[in-house]
C-alpha cells in the first residue's frame, strides 16, 4: 500500500539521484561523464571532422614515397582515397 510518506520518500530519493528520467535539455553521453546540451550534440552530429593524424594508407613504404615525392601521389591514388568515404 502506498502511503503519502512512502511516496514523498521515493520522490526525495529520485530527486537526490538527479532524476535521470527527466530530460532537462541536457544529456549524459557516458556513465558519470559530463552533460551536454541538445544543441551541442546536434552540432557534433552535423559537423564534418577531418582527422589530420590519420595515415593515407597502411602501406608505410608507399606512404613514405608519397611524403618524400608528392608528385608520386597520382590521381588514381586520390580517387581511391576520396571514394573510401574517409
Image (spheres, rainbow, N blue to C red):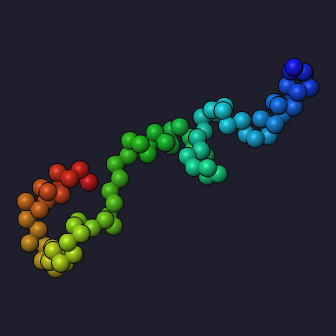
Horizontal side of 17 relative to 86 (left or right) equals right
Q: Quadrant of residue 74?
A: bottom left
Identify which residue is drawn at 92% across, 26% down: 5
Residue 65, percent from left and from top: 14, 77
Residue 62 visible in the displayed image: yes
Q: Which quadrant holds the N terminus?
A: top right
Identify which residue is drawn at 72% across, 35% down: 19
In the image, residue 46 sits, relative to residue 67, either above or below, namely above
All told, the count of numbered labels is 0
Residue 47, percent from left and from top: 38, 46
Q: Quadrant of residue 68?
A: bottom left
Identify which residue is drawn at 87% across, 31% down: 9
Q: Which quadrant holds the C terminus?
A: bottom left
Horizontal side of 47 relative to 21 (left or right) equals left
Identify which residue is drawn at 23% across, 65% down: 56
Residue 78, percent from left and from top: 13, 59
Q: Nearer the viewer, residue 14 or 53?
A: 14
Residue 53, percent from left and from top: 33, 67
Amino acid at each position: 500500500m502506498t502511503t503519502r510518506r512512502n511516496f514523498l520518500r521515493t520522490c526525495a530519493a529520485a530527486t537526490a539521484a538527479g532524476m535521470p528520467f527527466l530530460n532537462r535539455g541536457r544529456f549524459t553521453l557516458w556513465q558519470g561523464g559530463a552533460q551536454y546540451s541538445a544543441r551541442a550534440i546536434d552540432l557534433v552530429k552535423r559537423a564534418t571532422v577531418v582527422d589530420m593524424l590519420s595515415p593515407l594508407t597502411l602501406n608505410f613504404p608507399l606512404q613514405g614515397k608519397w611524403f618524400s615525392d608528392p608528385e608520386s601521389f597520382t590521381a588514381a591514388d586520390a580517387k581511391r582515397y576520396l571514394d573510401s568515404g574517409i
